[in-house]
């Protein structure tokens, strides 16, 4: 996001945005740490066979002191939906938002062997050209693809792996036999 013609309102808005996210990340991280200390309680919080009232009371004990009404409501929503186990992922997503803003695009790039710096740069450059400047890339290696690259961006998969090429060739040869 870029500021409007007057950068002052944007600076204030960005400060509020950054502070709000930092507060949520801090408070959710404290809740996560409390859950880790309690261990087995985490499983009870997602267990629908335990009454909501009992799970809510457990969560109430684990909330950081001075928790805001918003944090409490959010935590109770996680409990009611059985999503307490997603807390680490939620914190990771918030950290990603804090770093890159709301328009971040997540890409997963898989290669058979770790790419060279030049290969990484070329892939990053192409992804940024195609999807815009806010691309967060996760790099993975998987020897099963033999060579080439598999790129996942949202629901889109670009599969230029040797394994897929060989499978296509195998299918084509079966069709002509």
Image (tube, grey):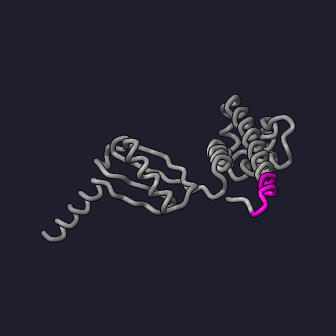
The residue depicted at 28 percent of the width and 47 percent of the height is: 146
Front position in the image: 57 or 136: 136
The answer to whether residue 160 of the structure is visible from this angle is yes
Does 9 appear in magenta? yes
Give the residues in magenta: 5-13
Can see residue 85?
no
In the figure, is residue 55 to the left or right of 97? right
Compared across the picture, whether 2 is left or right of 59 comes to: left
70 or 57: which is nearer to us? Answer: 70
Q: Return the residue found at the far top.
A: 37
Location of the N terminus by quadrant is bottom right
Which one is nearer the viewer's eye here, 33 or 61?
33
Residue 161 spot, x, y in % from top left = 31, 54
- Residue 149 lies within the magenta run: no
Residue 134, located in which quarter of the rendered image?
bottom right
Q: Is residue 121 above or below residue 172?
A: above
How many tags in the picture? 0
Check the image and report above or below for 164 versus 76: below
Viewer-side residue, 120 vs 94: 120
Position in image of residue 27 (x %, y %) = 77, 39
Q: Answer with left or right where residue 43 lies relative to residue 139.
A: right
Magenta residues, dominant SS class: helix
Q: In the displayed structure, does residue 154 sit left or right of residue 22?
A: left
In the rendered image, the quadrant that contains the C terminus is bottom left
């Amino acid at each position: 996001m870029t500021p409007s013609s007057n950068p002052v309102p944007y600076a204030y808005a960005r400060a509020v945005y950054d502070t709000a996210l930092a507060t949520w990340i801090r408070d959710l991280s404290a809740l996560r740490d409390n859950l880790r200390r309690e261990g087995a309680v985490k499983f009870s919080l997602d267990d629908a066979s335990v009454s909501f009232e009992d799970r809510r009371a457990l969560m109430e004990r684990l909330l950081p002191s001075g928790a805001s009404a918003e944090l409490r409501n959010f935590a109770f929503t996680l409990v009611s939906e059985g999503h307490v186990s997603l807390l680490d992922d939620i914190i990771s997503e918030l950290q990603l938002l804090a770093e890159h803003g709301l328009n971040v695009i997540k890409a997963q790039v898989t290669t058979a062997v770790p790419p060279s710096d030049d290969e990484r740069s070329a892939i990053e450059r192409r992804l940024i050209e195609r999807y815009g400047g806010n691309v967060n890339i996760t790099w993975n290696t998987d020897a099963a693809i033999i060579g080439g690259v598999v790129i996942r961006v949202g629901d889109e998969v670009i599969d230029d792996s040797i394994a897929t090429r060989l499978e296509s060739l195998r299918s084509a040869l079966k069709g002509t036999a």
